[in-house]
Amino acid sequence: MASWDEYVNCMEARGTQFGQVARDIKTAAFHGVGDTALAFINSAVSWWDALDPQVRRALAWGLTAAGAAGAIITTRLATVIIDTAGVELLLGAGTEVAAGLAAIAAGMALGAFMTASELPRQSDRVLTRRN
Amino acid sequence: MADYRSYVDGLDEVSLASLNVLVEAGVDLSQAEDEEGPLALPGAPLFALAAAAQRPLEEVGSAVQNSYDATVGQAEQQA
């Protein structure tokens, strides 16, 4: 089984809406290319793990408190993640990624992989599969 | 003010950029709290100011510092 499929299965196990976010990320943001989508997820996990702990708390709170501005915030955060990832796969896909950031934003707004309590567990799964 | 600048200057580049995304969208981090309690960010009123201005944290810190220095300098000249 491909790593991306395993990731989607993990998300599905947490609820249908989470599985849908994973599928949307792949189809809408990455044109169905699982390797690129997984690279983004791993970059997001690395970004989150590297953040100052208090900043992590501020982001988790801010994403829920932002209301209407949430979509703008998540799109900009996705850009920060891609800019700082240094993953050639993502940098090369910049234009395509920009066109599909709405799906990523939806995933973040849902808390699919951007909440303090959930992301570390997901991080373990993704990184374990990579190793 | 010193606590605020120390905190902001001490953040790594990615953490600061990520925090600025919230601030520049107008999110007032001085109100932030979670299940662990209030975040109690140092210099909280300046975080509120940055959110109101929707400007980066480091820029607001510099502007406030410059304004403070100018005011103190003016007061010293008048004294």
Image (cartoon, rainbow, N blue to C red):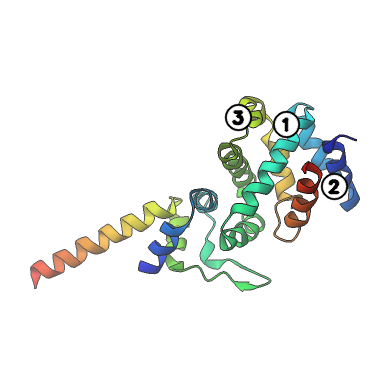
Q: Nearer the viewer, residue B71 or B58?
A: B58
Disc 1 crowd rating (10 Å Cα; few below 14, some 14-19, many 20+) is many
The disc numbered 2 marks a residue on which chain? A
Please tell me the numbered disc located at residue A36. 1
Task: Mark 2 vs mark 1: give the one in front.
Answer: 1
Disc 1 and disc 3: Cα gap in Å? Answer: 10 Å
Q: Which residue is mark 2?
A: A11
- Disc 3 designates what residue? A91
Q: Chain of mark 1?
A: A
Horizontal and vertical percent position of residue A96: 66, 26
Disc marking residue B50: none
Q: For the N terminus of chain A, which image quadrant?
A: top right
Could you tell me residue A102's position as x and y percent? 69, 37
The kind of residue on which mark 2 rests is Met
Do tag 1 and tag 3 residues touch (Cβ < 8 Å)?
no
Q: Residue at 60% across / 47% down in the picture?
A: A73
Q: Which amino acid does the dot numbered 1 rest on?
A: Thr
Query: Which SS class for mark 1?
Result: helix
The residue under the point 60% across, 42% down is: A81
